[in-house]
Image (spheres, grey):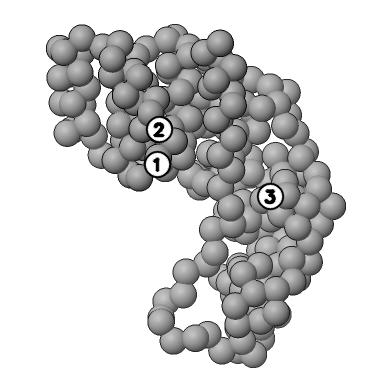
Amino acid sequence: MRVLCLLAILTVISAPSFASESSSKPPDLLALRASAEQGNVAAEVALGSHYYRGDIVARDYAEAAKWYRQAAEKNDAVAQHDLGFLYLTGQGVHADDAEAFRLFQMSANQGFPAAQTNLGSLYLKGQGVAQSYAEAFKWFLKAAEQGEPAAQTELGNLYFAGLGVPLSYADAYFWLTLATNAGIDASADRRREVEGLLKPQEIADVQKRLQEWKPGRIQ
């Protein structure tokens, strides 16, 4: 029953990341397009994001996919992730779980935490790849160590159920607390459940770990 409950909530998929603007001033669409057409990767990703959002230009998922693809082919991790999301959801392209997995994997291998989280989710569900709790744990851990709250939630749940990793209520409590502190409501109830399974000294030990923890990329 515990595993069934776990699988019911482990469905978090990170959406496109959207290139951040360096200024609050609305971007010049013509200049941005000209730069993208000249092969500027940052401009390609930004233009794809604007087409996805439909803010300074009419929303067009096919155009978003076009520009993300151009940047992804230049090995840009954000574009690879965002194009993967389009393939996963079938927005602007034909839905293709295997292609989404391939793109998430390329991005994740460059250390992009949203892609690592999504890769873990695909491994968890066996979507676009053979199901593997061990691989799901591996990628959730990489993202969680970088401070990705969704991955921290997933990781805490895997520790709670002992899937892909030996069962550990202390580790589950650690990661679920980090996620809860980051505002992930889905982790709060499970955290309270796990807390009831720990001894006071175990909780104190986890609290010490939390005070000392700092996000950082792991290989």
Tell me whether circle 1 and circle 2 mark residues in contact (CB < 8 Å). yes
Residue displayed at 34% across by 14% down = 169
* Among numbered discs 3 and 1, the one appearing first in the sequence: 3
Q: What residue type is labelled 3?
A: Gly
CA gap, disc 1 and disc 2: 6 Å
* Residue 31 x/y as whole percent: 60, 89
CA gap, disc 3 and disc 1: 24 Å
Residue that numbered label 1 is attached to: 184
Q: Nearer the viewer, mark 3 or mark 1?
A: 1
Residue displayed at 41% across by 81% down = 23
* Residue 156 x/y as whole percent: 41, 25
* Residue 215 x/y as whole percent: 31, 41
Tell me whether circle 2 and circle 3 mark residues in contact (CB < 8 Å). no
Residue that numbered label 2 is attached to: 187
Confirm whether residue 142 shows in the render: no
User: Which secondary structure lies at badge 3?
Assistant: helix
Q: In this view, does 52 lie above or below 84?
A: below
Nearest the camera: 136 or 150? Answer: 150
* Among numbered discs 2 and 3, the one appearing first in the sequence: 3
CA gap, disc 2 and disc 3: 26 Å
Q: What residue type is labelled 1?
A: Ile
User: Which secondary structure lies at badge 2?
Assistant: helix
Confirm whether residue 186 shows in the render: yes
Tell me whether circle 3 and circle 1 mark residues in contact (CB < 8 Å). no
Residue displayed at 40% across by 33% down = 187
Residue that numbered label 3 is attached to: 84
Q: In this view, does 99 lie above or below 82?
A: above
Callout 2: 10 Å neighbours few (<14), some, many (20+)?
many
